[in-house]
Image (spheres, helix red, strand yellow):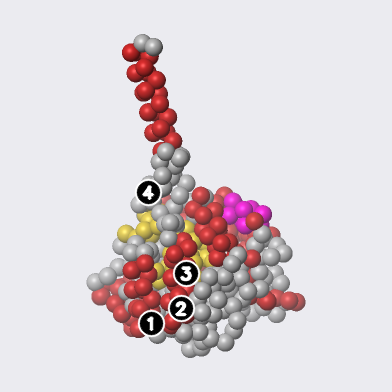
Amino acid sequence: MSVRRTILIGVVGLALVLASERRGGAASGPSTEPSDRHAVLGIQGSRFTINGKPTFLLGMSYYGGLGASDGFLRRDLDELRRLGFNWLRVWATCGLFDQDISVVDAEGRPREPQLDRLKRLVADCDRRGLVVDVTLTRAGKTPGWGMPNLKAHQRAVETVVAALREHRNWYLDLANERDVGDERYVPASELKTLRELVRRLDPSRLVTASFGGHDLTEEDVRESLQTAGLDFLTPHRPRNPGSPGQTEARTRECLAMMKTMGRFVPVHYQEPLRRGYVDSDPSAADLLADLRGALSGGAAGWCFHNGPQRGAPENRPRRSFDLRDQRLFDQLDDEERKAVDQAAIEVRRSHSQD
């Protein structure tokens, strides 16, 4: 064999090895660089980033996602991407409508196959470039709804973080509506303990804890950012007919409170008003007005929230609260379809005016 041919074969071989490494092939070992399809969530000031690019998080409630079939899940995730959505919210402690699909038990220990389903859901979202909100809940009395005390809550955090650590496309809501005065309540001192635990286990993981049913006070903001050390704010605003017209001003007020404290973080509306919750169901126009208020006010994210139809037989459609018999998009009504078809257009229009 000639020297020239030997060199050519060596060059071709090296090129194949490098190509294999770029694809994450056998020669490369675990890759530390995200592919173009993966989502690495970050924060720059009061904005979120995906793969380093400032991005408004446009999402959708998908609480019962761990109860959906693989076929339902695949079709819903594909439709989310097609419509321009880039995140979804899943409850890791979930006992909705007689289905306990929680990934941990009352002591915070792993439950299978639910934990494996959460891992696969986060991986499926990662491949599609979707961010996932993984939410835990404190609850002492209702099976499947959460952990009864701090010790179990700490173990649940350890379980979830260990299971999902390899993915960078998710954040953790430590405690859904943590300030509501029932079994969901988690004091700021315990939030701080939980936040510090996540920081030890996974230093770059983003963490929040949500508030229920009201706009934030200066004390709420200070408690979240200075006492508990959370990475961003997730207020659940009031749900009444006047709410959409208030969202811009309330967002600006929240950002102004942060300015006085010398720390800017994202304001993320992960659970705003929805249809089926109040007597006067918000129309598509109301939902989109709320989204526009969030965008104009400087919020970093907004969710198309959805849930069961209160007062209807068996609370159907149950939407994201129960995905066993129907996928989410097959349960949306005409007004909701109008809203989800238009939502990404509103986001693009807002950004084009910046």
Task: Give 270 or 245, whichever is nearer the viewer.
Answer: 270
Q: Is residue 34 above or below residue 245?
A: above
Q: Amino acid at mark 4?
A: Thr
Of labels 1 and 3, the one closer to you:
3
Magenta part of the protein: which range? 71-79
- What mark, if any, has residue 32 been given in the picture? 4
Q: Position of residue 263 (x, y in %)?
A: 27, 70
SS for callout 3? helix
Q: Give the mark nearer the N terminus: 2 vs 4.
A: 4
Q: Residue at x 50, y 76 (%)?
A: 108
Q: CA distance from mark 2 to mark 3?
A: 10 Å
The N terminus is located in which quarter?
A: top left
- Indicate whether 54 appears above or below 172: above
Q: Secondary structure beneath disc 2? A: helix
Q: Which residue is mark 2?
A: 153
Task: For mark 4, give the secondary structure.
Answer: loop
Asked whether disc 2 touches disc 1, contact meaning CB atoms under 8 Å apart, the reply is: yes
CA gap, disc 1 to disc 3? 18 Å
Q: Is residue 236 left or right of residue 113?
A: left
**CA separation, marks 3 and 4?**
23 Å
Return the residue found at the far front.
1
Discs 4/1, front: 4
